[in-house]
Each structure stands twice: as structure tokens, then as C-alpha cells.
Amino acid sequence: MGKTAIRTVCKVDFDKPAAEQPYLHNRWHPDIPAAATIKSGETVKIECLDWTGGQIKNDDSADDVRNVDLTKVHYLSGPFEIEGAQPGDVLLVEIMDVQPFEDRPWGFTGIFDKSNGGGFLDETYPSAAKAIWDFEGISCTSRHIPGVKFAGLIHPGILGCAPSAEVLNTWNTREGELIAANKLDRIVANPPEPINIHAGSASPELTTKIGLEGARTIPGRPEHGGNCDIKNLSRGSKVYLPVHVPGANFSVGDLHFSQGDGEISFCGAIEMAGVITINFKVIPSGLATLGIKSPIYIPGPVEPTFGPGRMLYFEGFSVDQHGKQHYMDVTVAYRQTCMRVIEYLRRYGYDDYQIYLLLSCAPIQGHVAGIVDIPNACTTIGLPMDIFEFDISPGAEVVKRDLGSCAFETGKKGLVVDDAGKNSEISFGGGLNYKE
Amino acid sequence: MGKTAIRTVCKVDFDKPAAEQPYLHNRWHPDIPAAATIKSGETVKIECLDWTGGQIKNDDSADDVRNVDLTKVHYLSGPFEIEGAQPGDVLLVEIMDVQPFEDRPWGFTGIFDKSNGGGFLDETYPSAAKAIWDFEGISCTSRHIPGVKFAGLIHPGILGCAPSAEVLNTWNTREGELIAANKLDRIVANPPEPINIHAGSASPELTTKIGLEGARTIPGRPEHGGNCDIKNLSRGSKVYLPVHVPGANFSVGDLHFSQGDGEISFCGAIEMAGVITINFKVIPSGLATLGIKSPIYIPGPVEPTFGPGRMLYFEGFSVDQHGKQHYMDVTVAYRQTCMRVIEYLRRYGYDDYQIYLLLSCAPIQGHVAGIVDIPNACTTIGLPMDIFEFDISPGAEVVKRDLGSCAFETGKKGLVVDDAGKNSEISFGGGLNYKE
Amino acid sequence: MGKTAIRTVCKVDFDKPAAEQPYLHNRWHPDIPAAATIKSGETVKIECLDWTGGQIKNDDSADDVRNVDLTKVHYLSGPFEIEGAQPGDVLLVEIMDVQPFEDRPWGFTGIFDKSNGGGFLDETYPSAAKAIWDFEGISCTSRHIPGVKFAGLIHPGILGCAPSAEVLNTWNTREGELIAANKLDRIVANPPEPINIHAGSASPELTTKIGLEGARTIPGRPEHGGNCDIKNLSRGSKVYLPVHVPGANFSVGDLHFSQGDGEISFCGAIEMAGVITINFKVIPSGLATLGIKSPIYIPGPVEPTFGPGRMLYFEGFSVDQHGKQHYMDVTVAYRQTCMRVIEYLRRYGYDDYQIYLLLSCAPIQGHVAGIVDIPNACTTIGLPMDIFEFDISPGAEVVKRDLGSCAFETGKKGLVVDDAGKNSEISFGGGLNYKE
Amino acid sequence: MGKTAIRTVCKVDFDKPAAEQPYLHNRWHPDIPAAATIKSGETVKIECLDWTGGQIKNDDSADDVRNVDLTKVHYLSGPFEIEGAQPGDVLLVEIMDVQPFEDRPWGFTGIFDKSNGGGFLDETYPSAAKAIWDFEGISCTSRHIPGVKFAGLIHPGILGCAPSAEVLNTWNTREGELIAANKLDRIVANPPEPINIHAGSASPELTTKIGLEGARTIPGRPEHGGNCDIKNLSRGSKVYLPVHVPGANFSVGDLHFSQGDGEISFCGAIEMAGVITINFKVIPSGLATLGIKSPIYIPGPVEPTFGPGRMLYFEGFSVDQHGKQHYMDVTVAYRQTCMRVIEYLRRYGYDDYQIYLLLSCAPIQGHVAGIVDIPNACTTIGLPMDIFEFDISPGAEVVKRDLGSCAFETGKKGLVVDDAGKNSEISFGGGLNYKE
């Protein structure tokens, strides 16, 4: 408590492949050996790699994003055994601090190529793109999206306790059924697959088993949270996590400097490596006394406050870009809401991919506004006007600026697919010039 | 300005059926005659009925909700011709004030029976129920949901300009296609239908035409907004509405004293009759200069502020209550998030229907948290802890209280359908009693 | 509770002099007869005159302000007997609503002439001036201070319970000592004085006694609150008031549509007539159990929120405009802080009196920032930038506008006294024109 | 910009006396040599000692506070020459970050003995006392004031540019006149005094001159800001500082983890050593174009938000604890407001000195509420209820707890002076026990 330094239970090494570091792992499984033991009541520091394990560079090409190896991501720190935690308990996790490494004050937001990961708007924007963000204290700016600056609501994208064998089996069964029933022309879920499996300090035999059974880290899941990508799980937040195995086996990773609701471009937060400081407390029999099945949380008392009158809201409905009416489909509505923001911001000189990136990582508010007026679900996105250096309010004059471009693959521009399915390259700064 | 009273352009009559009042109408159609003319720049008062046109009474039975005639709802005030507005313009609507009638300081929240309207959770909660809310200044309380009190973020549920014939045709076509393709065992959209049609002061011939073509008012639609049910469109908000016909033909109605994100029980806001004060301004060619296809808005500067540390957040994922995995289905995720809140609040003595009602009308925050981590969409609901008279934070002692019940049909309790599809009556105050 | 109208316990009459209305009074005294009786737990409506009792008109001359009769102000509504309240109790007053009269949607802010009331900056600005404000819903604008618009945080300037004879004696003694010791060339306090005394329904004999003993209403006093002019005592606030006499004898008046911290021009809030809705509850022995000597309060949950990044702060220190160093004098520091705002806003075309009026009534934040670094107290004023229609942030271009003038006496402009004591007339729109 | 580390222009050494470190100084004077040069537009890191230069230890005795040498405090880092800055310019200082040293995660709040420094309430509380605070991320707790925890709004207490010779002369003249005129039985200001003078890297001759002329650092001053102790000058804030000498000669120090309005105990913030990251920009001729005489600032967008309904407000008036009436004295009113908070919080088991310390460093809101109602100024203090681990709202049950004590001098308790001037020792946990 003050007089003594806070213990660091996991140190990462940037000079060694993630897969060779025994404090990391990339599957959810009850048998991954604990990387360290933490007392209930203790506060510790945990170092984390960025979620791609260092595959993305601080440069001006999106080639690394185009070619990212998605079997080598989500190296989580842990698992950590919390003394005394038992199935049925709740682990109270208080996030005391999250910081980038002092000598790595930068992060990235990426749009994956539709054929290698994709994203929420990949039907319209299939190309890979990237923006690098520089951190100065609580603020971030990007040479790839000039004209914006905002304070990060820094948080982990992934945290949770290990599943029990029974919970794991539930996951594999229900996701397997979805995969089996799939008729869409896209991957709908990833089953256990023994490629590039990293099970921490597990023996080769155990690693093989974990590869065959272990749940992939991409989706969050109701039983433990996991990759929930919640933008306000920041400093001072308290998260109540269900415990499924003795010792809880808590893992954390995928730190974000900032994220918008939805993290729409998939690699959409400002991804970074860094250090998270956490206090752990075990609440015995917490599942029953709290009446919870999924994690609950209370955000910290500190967040950027723009004031309601400084938010510009956009509406979207479950009618897609081809004019097709969907029945109460919030996903369609939210995608359309994103498109409305892109169309609006284009006027200032941004290209569509810059805005797509910005929507993913800036602290936008994404609300389920109306969900009962058949057949149209209505969603809204609130865009804080004060993150822009110029006035984007509806009453202000629109001046088209030279706002450069985000990073694309070498020698290419991003593609835009119109409603008829025709591809074309984006025109940089392609908005109408209202000043002229 | 101050010296002279603000002009009231529409007065409603509580002693006469809504269908006989020529300033009201219940369809969207370009030919409904204007009820009054308003200058660009003018501020006027508009009286509105509640959205059921007075079918719901201030009593302790939900029989009226059970038997509500859904062909006789959404009597909107208007349409109002705004001088000079032309297709392609934007109508800037500033909401100066919304008030209940001084002698009707109450409203209601209803859950429709699954066979007559239904709601977002009707698979689990199929019965009709009702809560009456009393207004005292900015606050509301309910004898049917004791223990809560909150400030209303008062707003209209419906506002928009009339569609052009072309826009109307688009609506009817795409919704017709949805209806034609429907294989679900439920109504997915309502086509034009000449029952209980009210077209304001239209002639009988014109009324017949409007009945055959006019769009129903239930869904919001991207081209004009309409029934978007957005909870923070309150006092001081500025809404930018697309204009499709000469004179704009603006209509408004369905006033809400308060609403939660999603308005989940369908009749879920605190519905009321009242007076809305609006300032209108025409922005010539606004569609092109603002780059909008759907309405945008800026909320007013005044709203209840609970502070991030006073919100308790719940998570939900696209795995339904039967354990089935859905692919990135935000609707499923949001329904599960609602269920997590119900399970949590049950402990204090509320029955499920009380909480379902409360979730619909209290200012909950419903976020699209993660939308790219296949196959699980993640949504969150933020519940402001300060609307409760007792401490609901996870660390506080849980005391089960006698919190009565909401109104049900005469002689019946509400039903709960469990995951296997079995019906049972709710047990009042059915939570575990943690104190004993 | 909803079904029945809220009882109005005091109705004011605009066609009759305030002094003839028996529900009003303008002194604090234990013997003023109760105007009505209210139950503990009851909610009632109370009508109030504006604090000048109607002396100020909605016109463009400040002659009425110049000549205001300050012996005829502060006609409070009440006193109201709260059943069961006893000395030593606390009266919990919850402010449910405050509204202007529907047919009087306007208010005023005045600067009194230095020789008839004066104000906080009267050494520099000795003239009378006035601004009329028009209310539209929660917002107000003024033809006398164009370019600003803000939401009012509406509240009563005065509320409190009657003093006991003993408390009254304490007041008269200590204020008398101040008057006796005064060596300043200004009035420092007003003793009881039997001019224009209005003691409600008191008999002539009793009125005479009250005139000789009754405390004037201008200052707030620690024992009961009174004229505390606190800007966020708005809708939803709970105030805990000490009770000194049986029945509490609660009075209220001096309604404000909005006020800045300090209410610096004396008649500085946006003064209005209106209706306040209050719920009363008696807390037996509350003084001892709450440990209070003066009122405490909790503001309501609803207030204009500008966001910290939309506030522009000014600093002032206890060095006066003549360069004289004062010892830790917060009053001097606050006056200097006001002057810094005036100097800053002048650039946009406002005259000094307009800004002085604006500072009095807009929701500025006035903080005691540093009070221990001898000899300089430091105060700050936070000015919300979003109340202006144009951008006043330090980085924006300064354009001098034609912003008219506030109302002055017929045929006169306002005077400005420079540091050497020399009088001159203000030059309208007198700032430098940075655009040229 | 991300790829390269941010330059540190000043490193402090904890193993060497402050007076021997050439990057530090403890006077304001134009001739102190620049410690480093910074470009306009550059972001740098600056290390700072705590304001006592390390005299206060992390232990449980206030002996160090009792005996602090006040001639050896306020070792500021700098001055730093900003390239191109000229008198008449404004230096725009953006505070990017403030952090404690990673290996010194603690700070202190002290009450000075009345005979050695004193504080705002020293007439009542004359003893020395201390509380040590431990930092965990954004939060702090104290073993000396248990039961509270809050997020720090971290900021520098002192920043400003060097005075010109002319400005310095103004300071010395006006403060000298105050000292000469003093008839109070206390020090009212500190003149230049050549004791323990530290002028950075100045030669002995120059140091002697600076000792004779240099302004002491205790008070803030209107011409440059200096020790203004403003609690929300935190991360993301932009401060506009007047430039008086070529190169600006900017200095900074006295870092605070948190502070309440007024910093009432003098050493009242949570004082700490740490690192501040600042971006500098010169605004040519900014004094004229901005119309400023004193610094202005815009707070950062991130701050703890408690919500208005979670603040408990106390009122104070200019009647002192002896019952004496003062004329519009805000300082007296603010002192009384502090006393009201102390009386209220005593009930929970805190001793008066603990509360006095807490009031100094917790983020209380101190407002100038009413400043025109003669003779009583009214001030308010808003206390955020959520910093307490138990419920301090007026409606909650009061349970007296064992809340220990702050640190006092070895073998002594703190003294309390009653209104008659009689000394007594505080009784620990001295409130009434309302539970029994």
C-alpha cells in the first residue's frame, strides 16, 4: 500500500515470439496451467501484448493488416490463479489503471481485408486499411486521420475466468451446431482448431488436448464475458466475473486505448500493448447472491464528458442499402447508422475508410433506440462533435479540407462496393466541396 | 416573443373520439390535408393525445391493455404545412418544451398480450400488464412499481414529415415483400389496411384512397424518421428532418414522459397526453448540404446525469434462452441483456412483469457494445442505480421487500414461459429472500 | 397522486397591489399569521410574484429599474404552517417543479443604480440597466443581449422557515452592531424599519410590532437560509431546513429562471413570477440527528451539462483594479474575475453592461479556487462556451458584431468609472475589431 | 510523435538536496537562467519534486509537518525558455499528462501548526496533522482517513512564466504596502528575503541579487498565475499564460494528485512528486488578441463525474463562529461552510482534523453562491457522496465507526479552540453515536 511497489505478475518480451512466452496463451480451456497465483484482496500489474501479438507496425502501409495471421492473435496474459476462488463464486475485478508502455506510446486501428477477417461494413468496404495513433497523455492523434483528437477511455478488450469442462462443452456444442447449419457465404464461427495453439506452460501432450478442445478467443460468451470489447470498462471500473474452476484462472489482454460502441472495423479499437493494474477480490457464492449469469460491471467515475448538447446523433433502421426490408434486425440497423455517419463526414474531405476507422475507435455512443415497432428496429449513433478540430455541427459552414488518407496496401487504394455490387476505388477527399 | 402568448395550432378534445377530431390522423400519406400553416421561424404549441387515443385508464386493471384496439392508435397531430418548405429541404425542428396537461399529471406503461401486440420479451412473458405513473414536476412514481422514482427525459415518440407518393410507394413495396416472404409464426409488418382510417379533414373519397395506400404508423422509417422512439429527443433537442412534399406536412404525437433504450415492452415508454412546443425552420436544399438520408439530431443540453459510477451494467450475447447460438444477432443479445436485469432485480421483491415495465420506461442505456466478434454480438444495458429508493449496488445487502405488483387482467396473474415452453403463473415477490 | 389535481395553497393576483394580498409578506417574523396549513408528506403548488412585486416592465427602458422602490420588494408567499413541525425538527423540502406563468413567459435582469441598490461592480458600473428575457420551454433569449441562448436551471431565490423570537433577536443584535461600527461610505445592512411593511393577514397592531422587529429579507442568514440565491436549487432538489417555531412557518419567493454563481448585479438572476410545486416532510429532531446548523441540500438529477472541455475559465486574485494588494479577500478576487470576463467578451461587440447582466444570470460557475496562499485569494469563473451562438473559444477568430445594447434610462447611456475615478459613457460595441 | 520517446527536459534527484539541483529554483525573477530550451509546438516531460522538496515522510507522525522549514519549499522545475516567445505573447500550455513516479505511489496532505504556516481554519484547529495517501491507478486511499476513496483530478499547483523586472517591481511594491499597513496579529505576506534562496544555475552574485528582489512563490498573482492551486487544471487542460520576458521562462511544480476548492489546510492538496508532460505553443501578440490580463484556461474533457444528485451541499454565511456579523466577507462565509461540513461528518466517527484534511484534498466544489445580499455573502460547498464507502446521505442511518485518526505530533492529539477561545484536545471519534 504505497510504501512497497505493486507486484508485476506477468512481464512480456517484445524480442521473443508470443508463442514462446509461457505467461501467454490463446485459447480458453480449464487445463491451461496457472501463470502465477494472486491473493484475494491483492493488487497486481499485468503486462499485455497488443492483440495481434506485435504483427502490426508503426508505418504507413496496410500490408501487415492485409496479411495478418489470424491464427496468431489474442495472446492473453495468464491465467492467474486467485487463491480460494471456487466454482459458484464471483471474482470482483477492479481495474485500477491501464497504461501503454512508456516507450511505446502508440497504437493502431485496422480494417481487415474481406477475405482475411473482414469487418462490420465489409460488404461496402472490402479493402484493408490502417491508422496509426500517437498517444500524448490521455489524448491521441493520428497522422492518418488528421483533424481529430480525443481522450482515450482506456480499457481491456478481453477479460474473464476460464471455463469449466462442462461450460467449454456447452460452447463447443452450440457453436458447432451453428457452423453445421450455416448456409451463408461466410465463416459464422470458429471451432477449436489445433493450429498455432499456445497453451502457456502446458506440456506438449496437454497442449495437443487443449488444441482439440480449447475455445477460440474471438467471441465473448455469456458464461464468462471474455472478448466483450466494452468501451467504458476503464480505470476505476468494477467487473463481477463468474468463476467456473477452482482458482478462477483469470486471463486478460487485448488492451484498447479507445473504442467506439461496436468496435465496428473488427480491429477497430486503438489496439496497443501495455500494463493493466488490477485488484482482485473473491465473493464467495457470488453467483447465487448476485443473481447473475453473465458478468456485470460498474464503470469508473472518470470518463470524457462532452455534454449532451455536443453530441450529433444519426439514426438507422433495418432497411439495408439495397432497399430491402428486414424484420427487426438491429444488426442491419446499426450498419445503416454507420453509413449515415460516413456520408455526413465525407463532406469535410475524409475518405470513407478514414471515417470507418474513426467510427471504430472514437468514443461514439451506439444505442438500441427502438426495438418493438415492427418491422423496423431503430439504432442511433452519437458522435461527439468536440473530437474534431473544426466545427462539424449542422449549422456550420462546410469546408472541404485536404485530410490525407489512411494507410492502404502498397500500391492500392481502398475499394468501395456500390449497392449494385460494382467495385470502384475511393476518390480521396471525395466529398462535394460546399465552399466553392 | 414573450409579450404575446405562443400560438396553439392544434387543440385536442378529451370528450370526443379521436377519429372525429379533424386535426388528428393515423396514417402517413402525402394527401392528408394540412391542419394548419406555420411560418418558418415560428414557435407554436401542439396538443397531442396519448398514443392509444385515450383507451388506457388510470386504474388498477390491465383489462384495457389486454383489449386495446390497435387499429385505433397513433392519432398524430397535424399535418402542419410549413410555409416555403420544398422537397429536398430539411426542416429544422427545435423542441422547446414538452409537458403533460396540467390536469392529467399521469401516464402509463403497458405490456401487450402476446396475441394482441406483444412485446420484445413476449416469448417469456406473454400476458398483458400495466403500470400507472404519477407525475410531480420532473419526477415520476408508480403505485404499481414502488421503490423507484426518476426524472423523465420527456420527448415525442413520433415526429416526421409526410412521405411523397414515391417514398410511400417504396415503403409499401419493400414491406410488402417482407410480408410475402414471411415464414415466421407472427406478424412481421402491417400493410395498408382500410380499417379505422382517420385522414384528418379529408373527404370520404380521399379517405378511402388514403386507407388503401397510407403507411401505418408503427415502424419508424429511414426516409423520414417517424416512430423512432428515441429517448433523448427531449427539451432543447434539434432534429433535422428530410422534406418530401411541398409544405413538409409535419406531424407529431405519441408523447413520452420517459423511455428506456429500446422501449422494450412496445407500449413501453410512459405514455401520456400533453403539449409540445416546437420551433420550425426551413433549411433550403438541406438534404444535399447536410449530406443526410435519415434524420439527425442534437439532444438538448439538459438531461438527468447519474455519473458513470452510478450505472450498473449488464451484458448479453447472441445465445438465446434455449442455449441456441445465433450469428451476430444483436436483437437476441439485447433480449438476453434484458433477461439479466430481470433476474438481478427479482431479488428485491419485484415480480418479472414489474421489471419488464420498468426496463421499458426508465432511462436505461442500451448499447451495441461489440458487433464484430463472430458469432456473438454483445450488448449492454446500463441501469441507473439512483432511480431506486434502496441500494441495488452489488455490494449492498439484499433485502426482499413487499413491492406489490403491477396491474394484470382482472382475476389473473401474469404468465411466465420457461425455456422448455411450459407456462406458469409468476409468484409475486418471487425472488429468494437473502435476508432470512 | 395523479388522479386528483395538486392543491394550490397560494394564488397571487396581478391586478392588485402586492401589499393588499394576505398570502404575501415582506418580513421575517415568528408572529406573521400562517397563510395556509400543509400536511407533512403533502405536495402543493404555491404561486409567487417576481421579487419586485411587479415593478419591472417588459419594455426597453431601465427607468423602472432606476426608480425601483426597494422598500416594496421580496413579497414572499406564505408563511405556511406544516402540521406537526416543532423547533429542533428539520423540514425536508423537495422542489418538484418551478414554472413561469403560462401567460407571462418572460423575466428580467437588472443592474441597480449605485445610488439606489447598486451591485457587485457598481464602483465601475454605476448606472441602471436592464435586459428582458423571453422563455421558450427550458430556453431563454434576450433582445437586449443577442447571440446567447441557454437552458434555465430554474429555482427559488428565497426559501426558509420563520425565525423564533430568540433567533430574530440574534439577527437584529449582530446586524445592528455591524451598522453601528460602519465607517464605509455605503449601507452595510438594513435594520428593521416600519416602511411599507406587509405582514400578511396580521392585524394593524401586530403589523406595527412586526415592522419594528421583523428582519428584512435581503440577506440570507445561517440559521434558516432565506435569501441564499443558490443557482442549482432546482427541480428535484431536496433542501433540509431548520425549524425554529411550531408549524415551521415556511415561506418562499423570488423565483429565478436562471442565475450565475454570485448573482452579481444584485437583481441579477432572471427574475420572474411563477408557480413552485413543493413536497414537504417533517424530520423530527432533525437538527440533532443531521448535525446541521444551516440548511443543506442535494441538487436535482437534471441540469444543463456542458462538459468540462466546453467551459472557459477566468482567474482573479485579491489585487483590486487600482493595483492595491488585499489580504486574502475573496470578494475582491471574485470582483476581479468578473472584470476579466467582461474584458474578454467585449471583443465580440457586447457593451460592458450587457456582459455584467449576462454574468449575473447565465449559469456561470464561480469557484473559491485557492484560499491559503497569502496574501492572494484566487477565484475562478467558468463560462460555458455553448451559450453563445458564435465560437468564443480562444482559438477561434474574433469577429466584432453589432450586438445592440441592453436597456438604459431614457436618454442616457451607462457610465464606466475608470481606475482613476473618472466617469465616461460606454461606447456601444466598444471592443477592438480584430477582423479588420 | 509516437515513434520517438518524449524528451525529458528536467530530471530530479531524490538523493540530493533540492537546493543543489540546478534545474530547480524557488523564487520568481526574470534573471534566473533557463534550465533548458523548448521549441514552440514541442511536447516534453518535466520531473518535479513535491512542494516541500521531500521534507514530509510516508510515516504516521506529523512531526515533520510541525517542523517543516517553509523557507525550503516550492522548488519549481525550470525555468524553461520557449523559443521565440516575446513579451506580449501568450504561451499556450496543454497539459498532456501528470503522473506520480512509478516507484513513489503516495502523497500527503498536511495541516500546518498555527505558529508555522497555519491554514484556513487555524483559529479553531491550531495543531499540526498529516494524512498519507496511497495511489492505485486513478484512485487514492488513506490509512489515516479510512472509509474514503476517490479518483484524483491530478494537476500542477503552480505554473507560470517569469515576471519582467517591471512586473516584479509592481509585486514587491504592492505587497510591501500591505505588509507596512498590517495591524493583524499574523503574517499577511512574505517580502523578498535572502534565506535559502535557490536560483537554479545562477552565479553567487546573481543569486544574491535574486534573493533581494525575487518574489516568493506562495501567492498566485494576477499577472502570471503562479501558485493558483486550481483543482481542475488536469490532463487535457489548456492554459493561456501571459509572457513577460523573452523566452517566456516557464516554470512548473507543486504537483497535486487531488485538491478541493480552496485547498483549505494550506498543504491541503494531496502533494506528490511526479512527472508532468506538457505541450507548448507560442501565440504571438496573444495578450492583445485574447483580451486577457490573467491566465485563462479550458479544463480537460475528462474528470470524475458524480452527478448533481450525488452531491451534498452545505451553506455558509458571513457570520463568524463568535456570532459576529461581517460585511459581505466571502472568506468568512467560506470558513463557516467548511465548519458545517466538519460538524456533519463528525457523526460517522471522524475526528475534526481528519475532515479538515479531507476537505482540503477531496474534489469538493466551493462556490460563491450569493455576493450581493448585504450584509451576508453566501458560499456553498458541494461534497461528493460517492467518495465515502458508507452512505452519508441525509436519509441514511448514521453509524458511528472506528475510523482511527490522522497523524499528529508524537505524543500529542490535535487541539480544538472553542468559540470562547478555550483550547481542548479533540476526542477521537467524538461524534454522538446515533445508533445506540
Image (cartoon, coloured by chain):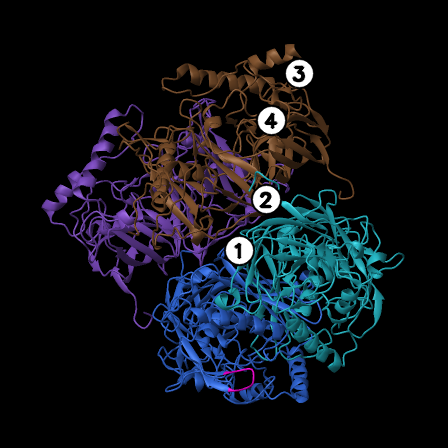
Chain colours: A brown, B purple, C blue, D cyan
Q: Are marks 2 and 1 on the same chain?
A: no
Q: Which residue is mark 1?
A: C308
Q: Quadrant of residue A159?
A: top right
Q: Which residue is mark 4?
A: A76
Q: Position of residue B296 (x, y in %)?
A: 34, 47
Badge 2: residue crowd in 10 Å (few <14, some 14–19, many ≥20) = many
Q: Quadrant of residue A160?
A: top right
Report the mark closest to the observer, 2 or 1.
Answer: 1
Distance of label 2 from label 1 (alpha carbons): 17 Å
Distance of label 1 from label 4 (alpha carbons): 36 Å
Q: Which mark is first along the chain, 2 or 3?
A: 3
Dot 3: chain letter: A
Cβ atoms under marks 4 and 2 closer than 8 Å? no
Magenta stretch, residue numbers: C417-422
Q: Are marks 4 and 3 on the same chain?
A: yes
Query: Mark 4 belongs to which amino acid?
Result: Leu
Dot 2: chain letter: A
As drawn, the label of residue A300 is 2
Q: Are marks 3 and 1 on the same chain?
A: no
As drawn, the label of residue A213 is none
Badge 4: residue crowd in 10 Å (few <14, some 14–19, many ≥20) = many
Q: Which mark is first along the chain, 2 or 4?
A: 4
Cβ atoms under marks 3 and 2 closer than 8 Å? no
Q: Main secondary structure of the magenta part?
A: loop
Q: Which residue is mark 3?
A: A202
